[in-house]
Amino acid sequence: MRIYLEAKNAGFLVSILWGGEPTLRKDLTEIIQFAKNEANFAFIGMVTNGFFASLYIQKISAKAMGRGMGIIMILLGTISLIFYFLR
């Protein structure tokens, strides 16, 4: 979580979680809460492929939306049979 404090000290105000798949992290809600409440980021967002949406989106939104999650973008272009075979 140190990286959020360093980013804030460098002048960053926005964090978008993406790359890999953010919903695979068990500490995702803690990261979001820390970025908003401790590092005081103005805006927190997340980009996901939506694969784990049914498991995590409700948990993330219930715990984090009220504390600063501004947007959850689900990329639908990755959901296809080819995607599963390439993984």
Image (cartoon, helix red, strand yellow):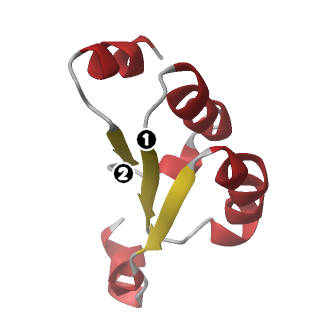
Q: Mark 2 belongs to which amino acid? A: Trp
**Disc 1: which residue:** 42
Q: Earlier in the sequence, mark 2 or mark 1?
A: 2
Which SS class for mark 1?
loop
Residue 25 is left or right of residue 20, and the answer is right
Disc sitting over residue 69 in the figure: none
Depth order, front residue of 83/53: 53
Within 10 angstroms of label 1, few (less than 14), some, or many (20 or more) residues? some
Number of disc labels: 2
Q: Is residue 83 above or below residue 45?
A: below
Direction from residue 65 to residue 11 in the image, left or right: left
Q: Dividing the image into 4 quarters, which one contains the C terminus?
A: bottom left
34 to 42, vertically: above or below: above
Residue corresponding to mark 2: 18
Answer above or below: position of 54 versus 38: below
Identified at 51% across, 58% down, the residue is 70
At a point 50% along the width and 65% down the height, the residue shown is 72
- Residue 77 location (% of width, % of height): 33, 85
- What residue do we see at 60% from left, 39% from top? 28
Check contact, mark 2 vs mark 1: CB within 8 A: no
Which one is in front in this view, the residue at disc 2 or the one at disc 1?
Answer: 1
* In the foreground, 55 or 39: 39
Image x and y of residue 37, in percent: 60, 27
Does residue 86 appear left or right of residue 63 in this picture? left
Q: Nearer the viewer, residue 28 or 55?
A: 28
Residue 20, given in percent of the width and then of the height, sits at: 36, 49
Q: Position of residue 49 (x, y in %)?
A: 44, 69
The crowd level at tag 2 (other Cα within 10 Å; few <14, some 14-19, many 20+) is some
Viewer-closest of 76 and 64: 64
Q: Amino acid at mark 1?
A: Ala
Q: Residue 6 sits in which quadrant?
A: top left
